Amino acid sequence: MLVSLVLGVPLLFLLAACLVGIGPDRTLSQRAKLAAYPIGAAFCASVATLYLVATQGPITLRLYDPASVGSFAFPIGFYVDRLSAVMMVLISGVGSIIYTYSIRYMYQDAHAPRYLALIGGTTFVLLCMVSSANLMMLFLFWQILSYLLYILAHNHSHAGTLDGAFRTFTLLRLSDVAFLAGIVLAHSLYGTLEFQELFARAAESTATLSLLPGVEISGATAVTLLLFIGGMGKSAQFPLFIWLPRSLYAPTPVHALLHAGIINAGGFLINRLAPLFGQSPATLHVALVVGTLTAVLGATMMLTQNDIKKTLGFSTIGQMGYMIMECGLGAFSLSVFHLIAHGLFKATVFLNCGNVIHKARQDPEFPHVDQREEEEHFSGLTWSTGLLTTLVIPLIILLATHGVLRIPLLESQGAVILLFFIWVTSSQAILTLTRLRAVASWQVSTAMLLTLLFVVLVYLFAVESFTAFLYPNPAEVASYFQAADLPNWLFDLLLLGATLSTILGWLYLYLRAHGRSVWMPPWVDGVRIRLYVLFMNRLYVEQAYQHAGKFLLRLLHRIDKHAQGWSQR
């Protein structure tokens, strides 16, 4: 029964893809609706798998002999633990909704059979990737996913679509080369690619690599850095993010699947290899820097876009940076919780994005703005509630955790990190509620307090229950936080800077909303305009890649001519 469930989840999606992709056009509607049944059954099977894994332990199925070198060419097997089971439920659930939505969304498209088959096939590949039994199988399906991203662009007769698909394909090849190099290095250092054996041998190994004379790094650091570069490409981390905005010509259901499942691959990879990453504080620090930079730049570039799909695309880049930053801080379970929440949210938003675009085409004035509401000032009750709630949150959390729950905050950066994420998330949600101007002030204030309560309870659930579910061993969780520890002065500086930014942001918005002038030096306006243009053009990273590519081609051409003995001028 266990084997049937594990194999049934991905194979049912593959069956649906074959069912809708093979057959005459006149029966497409019937076949498309019929294929929805195995897809729904796959979701039910994934839920049953999650229950069995949670109650009976991981499920292992190998179609090869790990001890045999000859069979290693096809290392197809499945290892489903709690992390894999959670990802299977997320992917199959979102995939079911996207496929059902796409049946009517694409019914007039000439290539609808290919499109629907690709949705089922891509979901099949995703499910196989998250349930891989070894690192090589994970890489094989990782590669197939990269090829499918090219085909999923769908409308290859459109020049912009074809160009974006090609850029996506070529850029992901760069990061995948690093991924493959990390796999080769891991096998040469530890002699295996089976996850559990790999983690055990890496923990016992003292192998080091010499980069330069006198400069050495541990084997775990070298392997995880290469693997992290592979994850950077798939999860659109800076500076490898330019493929995502270029892929936005595809149908919106494709983006729902992309932003809810495919782009989460980087976060899943780090969590799947968490015991290996936990042995390299240097790699975790690199992930923290890259994730933080991506989160800030992605959110800033999002604010300068004038297209709904580009706005959502850069929002995803920022959220993926946020997720990688959490991994860099050692909060692996929190990053999975973030991954699930973002996947569900972004899938819903992208599916509704098509409706917004359709309405905007029909009505140029959409969305409608009530000028009277736009001119109306925020009430003092709304702003005072939001401001005080935002400032009081840290005190409430500190008293509750330190005094009631007896959590030693000063002994672990990990506990402070989790509490800090509660505060930042609550502040963002409460700030959003200030835009509700069509309802009474007391209703907005009540919504702010309920939002605070909801976010705190959800995050406490994530910290306690979800962490215990994914990583039952408390010592393992503590080791991840310990590996990610920063110098105390740097950690305090980061917290202080983020806190001051949040408080000053509230004060600035309050003054602007009440029509009060905010004094700024004269040069600030000029800098602000230049920054706006810079971020609107995505930091000119694409142009930098183009110039680097042209320079590399010229260099290779000169080397080729020199090798053939041609005269150089």
Image: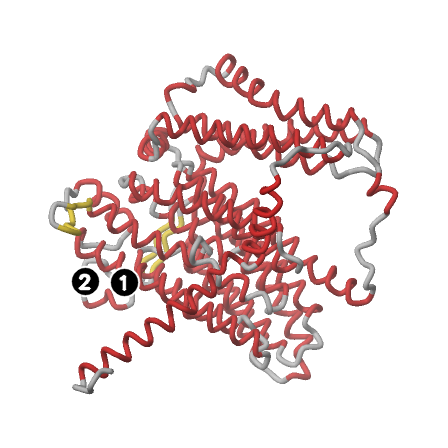
| Frontmost residue, 240 versus 60 | 240
Q: What residue type is labelled 2?
A: Ser
Q: Quarter of the image holding residue 1?
A: bottom left
Q: Where is residue 176 in the image (x, y as percent from the top left)?
A: 35, 63
How crowded pointer 1 is (Cα within 10 Å; few <14, some 14-19, many 20+) is rated as some
Element type at mark 2 = loop
Residues marked 2 and 1 touching at CB (< 8 Å): yes
Q: In this rendering, is residue 113 above or below 441?
A: below
How crowded pointer 2 is (Cα within 10 Å; few <14, some 14-19, many 20+) is rated as few
Q: Quarter of the image holding residue 118?
A: bottom right
For mark 2, what is the residue?
Answer: 68
- Residue 55 appears in the rendering: no
Q: Which amino acid does label 1 sit on?
A: Tyr
Give the quarter of the figure containing the C terminus. bottom left
| Frontmost residue, 509 versus 405 | 509
Residue at the extreme front of the image, as rendered: 522
Which residue occupies 44% across, 54% down? Answer: 265
